[in-house]
Amino acid sequence: MEKRPTWRQLLARERPLVLPGAYDALSARLIEMAGFSAYIIGGYPVAASRYALPDLGLLGLGEVSAAIRDIMAGSRLPVMVDADDGYGDVKNVTRTIRTYERMGVSALFIEDQVAPKRCGHMAGKSVIPIEAMERKIRAAVAAREDKELFLVARTDARAVHGLDDALRRGERYIKAGADGLFIEAPESVEELERIARTFDVPQFCNMLDGGKTPLLSNRELHAMGFAMVVHGITLVTRVARTLRETLAALRADKMDYAGSLAFDEFKEITGFTDWAAIEDEFGG
């Protein structure tokens, strides 16, 4: 099997590195089939698709990592995962890093929210002291065995204390050892531009339809200076809308089957041919 590129290699060749968000193994496979080089698994898609829950800190490492393991089974691509706040103090951060590294995750990010955390585009967030987050970052750096595991520090301070504090935290988090930076939920193009030009480490920007950040194209964000562009919940929200509309049509007995994916095509997406070949050769 061809060796997967490291996250730094992806950043060097993909400008920008566009990361669709997978919410299950099928969506991860479709991302790979669509030609993307990597993807991301966010907390909200996992909570929503697997448990029908909001992103309000209701899940622990065991529940989230089990979901991520299942999602990763659908794709060979490098993946970044949302490690929330590390699920506790520096001990928990250490365990989280070790867990995801053993699973084969290529990159992850941890955030500075006070537990229980919530989606970065929701109101009601709080952040821990800078020094506490610095300790978490240093613990994460020390915990990884493979130095190619790419560690991103996320701050949610923009919504709590303003952009200046978020930028100050970003500087401190980089000095603590973070490889990349994610300043969540800037609220204007001007703020995006300021964030992008302030740091010389790889940064990512999260495009969330209906969120606080202006929606720009991948090209525009890269021109500003963002190395990674995340579309974390785009797939799961569009699928949820399609499911709701389809169920309404079924209940009204107005189903249009012309809009469905062909069954033969669906079989190929799920690897039917390969599995049938194994059955033919060895199944008797």
Image (cartoon, grey):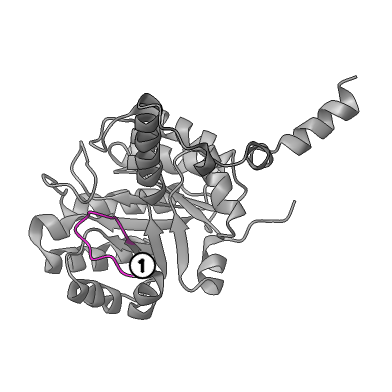
Disc 1 marks which amino acid? Gln
- Could you say where residue 233 lies in the image, as x and y percent from the top left? 36, 48
- Disc tally is 1
Q: Residue at x 41, y 39 (%)?
A: 96
Q: Residue at x 44, y 41 (%)?
A: 23
- Could you say where residue 258 lies in the image, as x and y percent from the top left? 53, 42
Relative to 191, say whether 110 is above or below: above
Relative to 240, say whether 11 is above or below: below
Q: Residue furthest top?
A: 284
Range of residues picked out in magenta: 206-216
Q: Residue 53, can we see it?
A: yes
Magenta span includes 207: yes
Other-residue count near label 1 (Cα within 10 Å), few / some / many at <14 / 14–19 / ≥20: many
Magenta span includes 28: no
Residue behind mark 1: 203
Q: Is residue 2 left or right of residue 186?
A: right
Work out whether residue 96 or residue 22 is closer to the camera in this orientation and state it: 22
| Image quadrant in which the C terminus is located | top right
Work out whether residue 43 or residue 50 is closer to the camera in this orientation and state it: 50
Q: Is residue 246 left or right of residue 106?
A: left
Q: Residue 93, can we see it?
A: no
- Could you say where residue 12 lies in the image, as x and y percent from the top left? 53, 73
Q: Residue at x 48, y 42 (%)?
A: 100
